[in-house]
Amino acid sequence: MTLSRRLACAACCALLSVTLLVAAPCPQAQAIDFYELQIYTVETAPLGHFMLELHSNSVTDAYNHQTQLPLYQLHNTLELTYGLLSWLEVGQYLCTARLNAGTYEYAGGRTKVHFSLPQTEPWPIQFGVNIELQYMRREAVTDPFNIEVMPIIQGELKGFLLVANLSFEKQFSGPGTHAGVGFGPAGEITYRLHDRFAWLEPALEYYGDLGPLQAPAGLNQQQQFIVPSVNLYLTPPLELNLGVGVGVTHAYSGDFVKTTVGWIF
């Protein structure tokens, strides 16, 4: 496939997904995804290789009794990704959780398509898109069926890697069905060390949910999380991400712990 056809195919996929999103006003914010707290970079899984990741996230503390965080719940998600092309990967998620009832159970599934826009020149900024279709159990999430389209913007500056994930999400079932298109920005600043410490990358992550595009939620009702974290590359196929998140708005004030373990086969 020629470069022009690749670009056309990528653009058509993104356009087709965006046309599925029909906005309508609503003043409520949606929910941060505790089944997968991850910043997507432009890079995809190596061609012809599988990557297996385990995402484990739990809320450990709440600062006020009105917080809407899922306190003491544990969310574990197994993600299997395959590098279909050098710039395209497909993946499948298996979500599990220990919910308020105290039992550990199956929570649902997701399917993703993640691609980068091929470049013929070394641009200072790279672009990609991640598209996910979610089909979860109603016992696990309030809005079990939705689609998410996430443009990815990535660049480097003097040893820093800067990544922005701009998530647009449309619910098709549950109380958020008529809420319109939700906007959830996320991002990461990573500093790449060198020499003996090349295996260690300190990072600062951010996750937010501003509510519907046409009627964003008030600041105190939004979700805003700051997550100091670290990326570890202990052996060539093994990657670790560890972080502690802090909620900084009234409706979502509390702490959570996130971990991701990845292995490339």
Image (cartoon, rainbow, N blue to C red):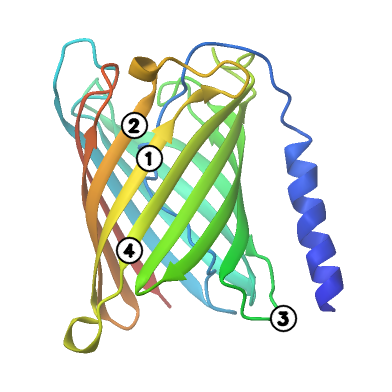
Is the C terminus in the top left, top right, bottom left or bottom right quadrant?
bottom left
| Sequence-first tag of 3 and 2 | 3
Residue at x 24%, y 20% (from the top left corner): 101
Mark 4 residue element:
strand
First along the sequence among labels 4 and 1: 4
Identity of the residue drawn at 40% across and 66% down: 161
Distance between the alpha carbons at the discs numbered 4 and 1: 15 Å
> Is there CB contact under 8 Å for labels 4 and 3?
no
Find disc 4 in the rendering and name its residue.
190
Q: Residues within 10 Å of mark 4 (few under 14, many from 20)?
A: some
Kind of residue indicated by mark 3: Thr
**Mark 4 and mark 2: Cα distance apart in space:** 19 Å
Q: Position of residue 147 (x, y in %)?
A: 63, 36
The image quadrant of residue 192 is bottom left
Q: Which residue is mark 1?
A: 207
Where is mark 2, residue-wise? 224
